[in-house]
Image: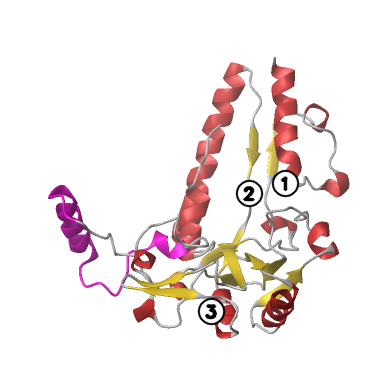
Amino acid sequence: MVYLPHLDYDHQRFGPDHPRSLAALEEVDRLVGDIRTAAEEMGAATLVVSEYSLEDATRPVHINRALREAGLAAVRRTPQGEVFDPFQSRAFAVSDHQVAHVHAKDARALDEARAVARGLPGVAEVLEGPSRAAAGLDHPRAGDLVLVAEKGAWFTYYHWLDDAAAPDFARTVDIHRKHGYDPCELFLDPALPAPKLRIALRLLQKKLGMRYLMDVIPLDASLVKGTHGRIDPDPARQAVFLASRPWSECGGEPREGTVAMAETKARALALLARAR
């Protein structure tokens, strides 16, 4: 199994149509060709899949700020800034680009969170119950509500109302304490006069055994130029499933010409079973 990240990072930084993103596309195309050639020489099958397709990001949607302003999401004020408090929150969102899972403590909180989501600019769909199941998200760990962003919009995890109150880890790469994906971790803060010098200083502090924070990540969500998660109606901008073997060897002809994401594992295993 080979992971090729080329169409992820630059596409989020610059947008899918930026020259750097198009150059990454050409590079990954060459690499896939090399991998397929090597596989054919070994007599192996090649399967190429993608999780999602990316589109231009035009505006962030601060769902947790909206829930906080409605009295649903809660924070704890600490010396390190305002820290999100899931235990005191009546409802909160776990965000990943164009999809956000909203978890509510009780029926009343769910009703209030639904009203917030439906009234928030940038939200295209609020899925729950049958609509959530129809989207393949009827899972115990899914949110009570699943929000899908409008074209170009995406959800931040930000819960603070003032950047001065942001927790100290917000300006670092920290995937564990942030309750949502933060694509700003792909950037160095352009507001810093000498970000590389700051990094060098922090590394020196580390080497000397001092406590430090690698606080070089921006809090400006408008820097993000590419996003994903929403299903684009244009097939040319959807995720791909490419196989060097016929459908009969990897799970059969897909219904309506579309391979469901949940079928990918079974189809890959079908190919492997034939190779044994």
Q: Which residues are magenta?
A: 183-210
Q: Of circles 3 and 2, which is in front?
A: 3
Q: What main secondary structure does the magenta stretch of the protein show?
A: helix
Dot 2 amino acid type: Glu
**Does 202 lie within the magenta span?**
yes
Could you say whether the residue bearing mark 3 is in a helix, strand or loop?
A: helix
Residue 38 falls in image quadrant:
top right
Q: Residue at x 63, y 17 (%)?
A: 43
- Residue density around tag 3, few if under 14, some if 14–19, many if 20 or more, within 10 Å: many
274 up-or-down from 176: above or below = above
Choose between 2 and 244: the one closer to the eye.
2
Q: Residue at x 71, y 61 (%)?
A: 231
Dot 3 amino acid type: Arg
**Does 201 lie within the magenta span?**
yes
The answer to whether 41 appears left or right of 265 in the picture is left
Q: Which residue is mark 3?
A: 65
Residue 33 visible, this angle: yes
Where residue 34 appears, as percent x and y from the top left, is 52, 31
205 up-or-down from 105: above or below = above
Mark 3–mark 2 CB contact (< 8 Å)? no
Choose between 215 and 75: the one closer to the eye.
75
Q: Which residue is mark 1?
A: 261
- Residue density around tag 2, few if under 14, some if 14–19, many if 20 or more, within 10 Å: few
Label number found at residue 51: 2
218 up-or-down from 273: above or below = below
